[in-house]
Amino acid sequence: MSDLKTSMREKDNIKKATITMVRAAILQNEKDNKVVLDDEDVLAVIAKQVKQRKDALEEFKKAQREDLMEQTEKELDILMEYLPKQLTEEELKVIVSDAINEVGATSLKDMGKVMSAVMPKVKGRADGGMINKIVKEILNEQ
């Protein structure tokens, strides 16, 4: 709320709109599921918003829409401020390798087991697509 008020005072329309949109998504989620979201659930909603922006950004790049790309990148930067520090690819490789050893995965058939072991460890700190790519790379090397 304080960031929303600050953005309104500073007339930062993109930040104001982004924060308002995230708040609406959180409230909608609470209303739909008849629960009050805890911090972890709020992070999941923000992560979902980040994923939507990244997907939209790819489409805008394909369509060569510079104006929309710029706005979406700003929205992404704002949303990333609210997520925990994102893990690097190297950190993810270590976590994935540990999970592979933990579940005894030997081929791509075990990908589901590996993903279910990794996701709780990195919740909100890594993109699922990136994790998926790393799991495939490591399992293909074995």
Image (spheres, rainbow, N blue to C red):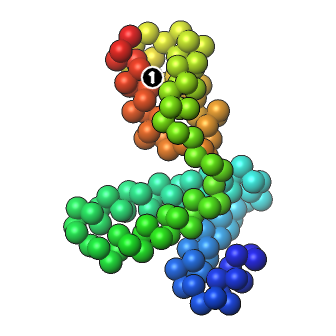
Which image quadrant for residue 132? top left
Residue, x 51% and y 58% (percent of image)? 50
Left or right of 63 in this view: 91 = right
Question: Furthest-left residue in view?
Answer: 63
| Crowd around label 1: few <14 · some 14–19 · many ≥20 (10 Å) | some
Residue 107 in sight in this render? yes
| Vertical position of residue 34 compared to residue 19: above or below | above
Residue, x 65% and y 60% (percent of image)? 82
Task: Count the numbered circles shown.
Answer: 1
Q: Nearer the viewer, residue 82 or 113?
A: 82
Left or right of 129 in this view: 20 = right
Which image quadrant for residue 107? top left
Residue, x 32% and y 58% (percent of image)? 58
Give percent across and percent down for residue 7: 64, 83
Q: Which residue is mark 1?
A: 111
Q: Nearer the viewer, residue 122 or 52?
A: 122
Which image quadrant for residue 136? top left
Residue 45 in sight in this render? no
Label 1 secondary element: helix
| Vertical position of residue 109 compared to residue 18: above or below | above
Give percent across and percent down for residue 1: 74, 75
| Vertical position of residue 31 compared to residue 9: above or below | above
Amino acid type of disc 1? Met
Give percent across and percent down for residue 20: 61, 76
